[in-house]
Amino acid sequence: MAEKKRSGKRPDKDGERWSQGVTEGSDALDLEDGVFTWDDPARIARSLKRSAESSDRRKSSPYRSAMSMLTFYVNRAGKELDAEQREVLERAKDELRKEFGRA
């Protein structure tokens, strides 16, 4: 018999989505609380850079780890992310590129 497909939108047994667990409990980066809710793209980028550079558990370069976490959050937040905050996070990507000298 075919197994019922999960939508991915259902909270797990603890009431959080798996993507929330990844963001909050990343084994590669120790993120500051609420970093993705801040309204200053440069501050977000600096925080992600600090987290990535100080991590000894990441598997790739600091730039790639920081950008991956930011992109992951934007993609997984999906429709739940309002347009204003999405724009802040997209600008944070540009700021992150500048912080790492890749702009």
Image (spheres, helix red, strand yellow):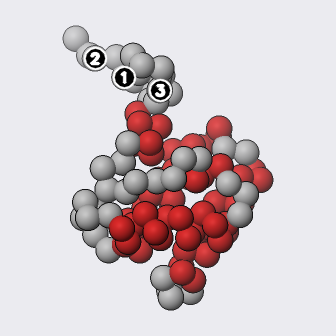
The amino acid type found where label 2 is placed reads Glu
User: Is residue 20 at least partly visible in the picture?
Assistant: yes
Judged from the image, the secondary structure of the residue bearing numbered disc 1 is loop
Please determine whether, in this image, residue 14 is positioned above or below residue 48: above
The residue lying at 48 percent from left, 20 percent from top is: 15
Looking at the rendered structure, which numbered label has been put on residue 3? 2
- Residues at marks 2 and 1, CA–CA distance in whole angstroms: 6 Å
> Quadrant where the C terminus lies?
bottom right
The amino acid type found where label 1 is placed reads Lys
Would residue 55 appear left or right of 78 to someone viewing this image?
A: left
Relative image position of residue 20 (x, y in whole percent): 47, 37
- Residues at marks 3 and 1, CA–CA distance in whole angstroms: 19 Å
Please determine whether, in this image, residue 61 is positioned above or below residue 72: below
Q: Residues within 10 Å of mark 1 (few under 14, many from 20)?
A: few
Q: Disc 1 designates what residue?
A: 5
**Residues at circles 3 and 1 in contact by the CB criterion of under 8 Å:** no
**Residues at circles 2 and 1 in contact by the CB criterion of under 8 Å:** yes
Looking at the rendered structure, which numbered label has been put on residue 31? none
Please determine whether, in this image, residue 18 is positioned above or below residue 73: above
Relative image position of residue 67 (x, y in whole percent): 46, 66
User: Is residue 86 at least partly visible in the picture?
Assistant: no
The residue lying at 56 percent from left, 70 percent from top is: 46
Would residue 82 appear left or right of 36 to someone viewing this image?
A: right
Q: Disc 3 designates what residue?
A: 16
The residue lying at 26 percent from left, 64 percent from top is: 56
Q: Nearer the viewer, residue 42 or 83?
A: 42
